[in-house]
Image: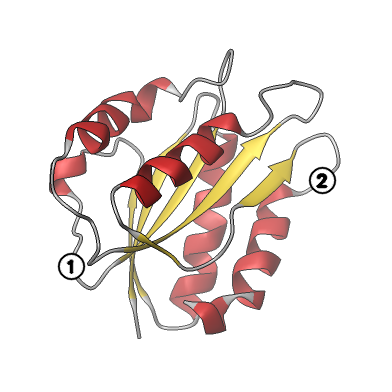
């Protein structure tokens, strides 16, 4: 059994549903989870954790407001996150040239902080996918062996 911290960046709530769907699958497999809808970097456990970062992209590639302080604190953190595993689920609309840019950016920030990526970035294109929650469930279930 592993422990997961699910960190959510969402403007309109759709990404919250995706995060809850991922949490459901992890709990079904008896993993420990904690979901953070208003994430505070300094309150989220790091040791022996896997962070699941679920975010949409807002505006011109920006982070949703609810995760901006988290991102600021993450960028400013001057220690290595090499004890931490992570994966990113990015929700976006491919008709924009900034498709899933917030998710790509947070993955790069985590890599710059020496965190350990366990799975490549998963993007959910709201144009192509009718049920993003189901898509996330299928993806996380398929990748459980890598976690």
Disc 1 crowd rating (10 Å Cα; few below 14, some 14-19, many 20+) is few
Disc 2 crowd rating (10 Å Cα; few below 14, some 14-19, many 20+) is few
Q: Which residue is mark 1?
A: 47
Residue at (71% x, 58% y) in the render: 134
Instruction: Check disc 1 and report its element: helix, strand or loop.
Output: loop
Residue 129: mark in rendering = 2
Locate residue 145, reporting x and y percent: 55, 84
Residue at (49% x, 31% y) in the render: 10
Residue at (73% x, 21% y) in the render: 97
Locate residue 111, reporting x and y percent: 39, 51
Locate residue 146, reporting x and y percent: 52, 79
Relative vertical location of residue 87 with respect to residue 56 in this rendering, above or below:
below
Instruction: Check disc 2 and report its element: helix, strand or loop.
Output: loop
Query: Farthest residue toward the top?
Result: 59
105 sits to left or right of 98: left
User: Which residue occupies the foreground of this view, 8 or 87?
Assistant: 87
Residue 132: mark in rendering = none
User: Which residue occupies the foreground of this view, 4 or 78?
Assistant: 78
Locate residue 103, reporting x and y percent: 53, 39
Q: Which of pointers 1 and 2 indicates the residue nearer the eye?
A: 1
The quarter of the picture where the N terminus appears is: bottom left
Relative vertical location of residue 108 with respect to residue 70 in this rendering, above or below:
below
117 sits to left or right of 136: left
Mark 1 or 2, nearer chain start: 1
User: Which residue occupies the foreground of this view, 146 or 21?
Assistant: 146
Spatial CA span between label 1 and label 2: 34 Å
Q: Quadrant of residue 144?
A: bottom right
């Amino acid at each position: 059994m592993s422990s997961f911290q699910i960190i959510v960046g969402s403007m309109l709530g759709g990404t919250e549903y995706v995060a809850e769907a991922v949490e459901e699958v992890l709990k079904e497999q008896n993993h420990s989870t904690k979901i953070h809808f208003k994430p505070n970097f300094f309150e989220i456990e790091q040791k022996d954790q896997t962070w699941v970062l679920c975010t949409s992209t807002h505006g011109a590639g920006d982070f949703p407001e609810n995760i901006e302080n988290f991102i600021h604190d993450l960028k400013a953190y001057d220690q290595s996150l090499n004890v931490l595993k992570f994966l990113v689920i990015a929700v976006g609309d491919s008709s924009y040239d900034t498709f899933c840019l917030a998710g790509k950016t947070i993955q790069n920030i985590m890599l710059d902080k020496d965190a350990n990526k366990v799975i490549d970035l998963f993007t959910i294109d709201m144009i192509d996918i009718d049920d993003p929650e189901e898509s996330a469930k299928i993806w996380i279930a398929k990748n459980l062996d890598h976690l």
